[in-house]
Image: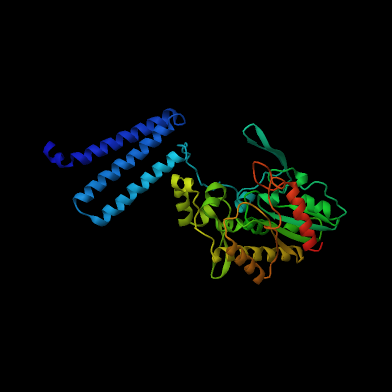
Amino acid sequence: MKNRLLPYKHAIGIIILVSLMAFLKSGIKAYNYEVYHIANTMLGFLQWFVVLLALLSWVIKRRFVYLGNLILALVMFVMLEFTCYFLLGMPIFIAKEFDTPELPADHISSHLGFVQWGDSVLTATKMNGQDTVYHVRYTIDGLNRRTTPDKDESKGKFALFFGGSVAYGYGIQDDETLPYQFQQKLKDYNAYNYANSGWGPQGMLARMEWRDLSEQVSEKDGLLVYVFLWSHIRRAIGDLITYSDWGWTMPYYTMEDNKLVRKGNFANGRFFPSRIYELVYHSNIVKYFNLNFPIGTSRAHMELTVEIFLKSRELYQKTFGTERFVIIIHPGDWDFINDDDKKLFKEILAERGLEFYDYSDVVVLNHETSIIGDGHPNAVAYDQITDLMIRDMRL
């Protein structure tokens, strides 16, 4: 028996060594992973190096050139992962779950993904060292909308606001948001804030598909405003950053036979891209170089975003019986798109007959117009944007 095992002694030794390292990792994780996470991670890298170098030695001896090149590439990849791990400061590894909560079919989150709790007051504080960046309260009504204070029942028109954190008013008080300032400056309008931090345009469409919003608004005439950032194109396609950081439960829309269709959310409605994102999200290389996939913004991505706008406009006009649907391109430091692509996107908007106003280069976000230590617009920026909207929309 001993003689039979002798030719495999190296393989058996490697298996025993790798198994011992796996046993040690399990022990560390069970004992105190947070304290000894560096040792745990180092053992993981060592496991990979031992296995890959053993395989490389084996294929070299047998002159399997193509397989040897592949394994050598994997060794170099692990080395780069190892280097980026150090450059990132050897962070603790936190495995992230990308599950979709099991909720009743008629639950709002089953249709919209993440939303604010209805009938709640949320307190948010952000610190930069010992300095307070902001300390604010978000008041959410029973219909999961951020409250716009000082509604006047005598006003005869509505303004529905949709978008992400900028329309929502991230980091500022209820009476400083863009919808609030719009309402204060126009004597005929009550503003309704349907935005939500992190949302893209699909959140607007999904919200209008889920419920008849005309039953939630007392006024019978008005307009809809979508506050757009260039990064919302990437949110519409559910790219790596959007998916892995916060948006895996966001509504997933895609084109089939030149028609926009809804397929659940990004996690359960598409298989291969989402599963790949869940894997590469944990890569130290991806985190260190701040990589995003797909690389670049294509015309197809822009057209999908525009189709979501068109379908939203159609549904809005059908629901409310009013025409005006406006896209405001707001300034922001989250572009992910070059100037040529910005021009192309605006050309597509114009070709499809969508009303839009581009203020991305008109209002500059600086220490006077943004939250210091955060980057989101402050009340001063929204005041400037509101004046531009009133002027250009001729309200």
The C terminus lies in quadrant: bottom right
Residue 74: where, in percent of width, then height? Answer: 34, 49
Q: How is the image coloured?
A: rainbow
The relative height of residue 324 versus residue 129 in the rendered view (above or below) is below
Looking at the image, residue 264 sits to the left or right of residue 381; the answer is left
Instruction: Residue at the far left: name it.
Output: 3
The relative height of residue 29 versus residue 336 in the rendered view (above or below) is above
Q: Nearer the viewer, residue 72 or 238?
A: 72
Instruction: Residue at the far bottom: name it.
Output: 351
Q: Nearer the viewer, residue 79 or 62?
A: 79
Instruction: Residue at the far right: name it.
Output: 154
The relative height of residue 222 versus residue 248 in the rendered view (above or below) is below
Residue 189: where, in percent of width, then height? Answer: 82, 56
Residue 356: where, in percent of width, then height? Answer: 70, 64
Looking at the image, residue 44 sits to the left or right of residue 311; the answer is left
**Can residue 369 be seen by looking at this rendering?**
yes
Residue 211: where, in percent of width, then height? Answer: 69, 56
The N terminus lies in quadrant: top left
Residue name at image x 75 percent, y 48 percent = 380
